Amino acid sequence: MTQYPPSVQGPPGVYPPGMMKPHRGAVVLVLGILGIVFCVICGIVAWVMGNEDLRQMDSGQMDPSGRSTTQAGRILGIVSVALAAFVAVIGVIWVLFFIVIAAGAATSGRP
């Protein structure tokens, strides 16, 4: 961590005037990729972190040099959530289809 002169140091987590928080673009991007490949929870975290970081970049609180990386990770997070929702809907449709087929087969043998 960067040490500032005592005159500009403040409480931990508070940056001196004129200084911005470092961006977390790489973290957001990795979480977005993990959200698509492994776990939708990572995608949700990437989406939320990306939104918050972009908001802080717009307000001048965070270093804007990682904007494109943050946006890419956020978009990957959104895509991972959309894919998970799509797969869940397809799964529900399949289950309902098999229930209807099984109910039809069970009732067709009766007089």
Image (cartoon, rainbow, N blue to C red):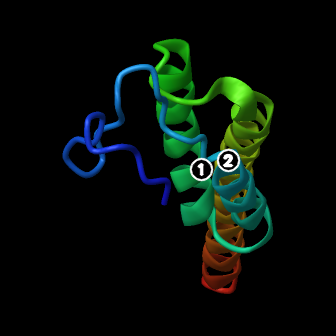
| Amino acid type assigned to the residue bearing label 2 in the image | Gly
Residue 104 as seen in the image, left or right of residue 11? right
Quarter of the image for the C terminus: give it. Answer: bottom right
Label 2 crowd (10 A; few <14 / some 14-19 / many >=20)? many
The residue at the point 40 percent across, 45 percent down is: 4
Mark 2 or 1, nearer chain start? 1
User: Where is residue 43 drawn, in percent x and y?
Assistant: 63, 55
Between 89 and 69, the residue placed more toward the observer is 69
Residue bearing the label numbered 1: 46
Between 62 and 98, the residue placed more toward the observer is 62
Label 1 crowd (10 A; few <14 / some 14-19 / many >=20)? many
| Amino acid type assigned to the residue bearing label 1 in the image | Ala
Between 33 and 70, the residue placed more toward the observer is 70
User: Where is residue 12 drawn, in percent x and y?
Assistant: 25, 52
Q: Is residue 81 above or below residue 54?
A: below
The residue at the point 72 percent across, 35 percent down is: 66
Residue 61 as seen in the image, left or right of residue 101? left
Asked whether disc 2 touches disc 1, contact meaning CB atoms under 8 Å apart, the reply is yes
Secondary structure type for disc 1: helix
The residue at the point 79 percent across, 30 percent down is: 68
The residue furthest left is 11
Please identify the quarter of the rendering in which residue 90 is found.
bottom right
Residue bearing the label numbered 2: 77
* Count of all numbered marks drawn on residues in the image: 2
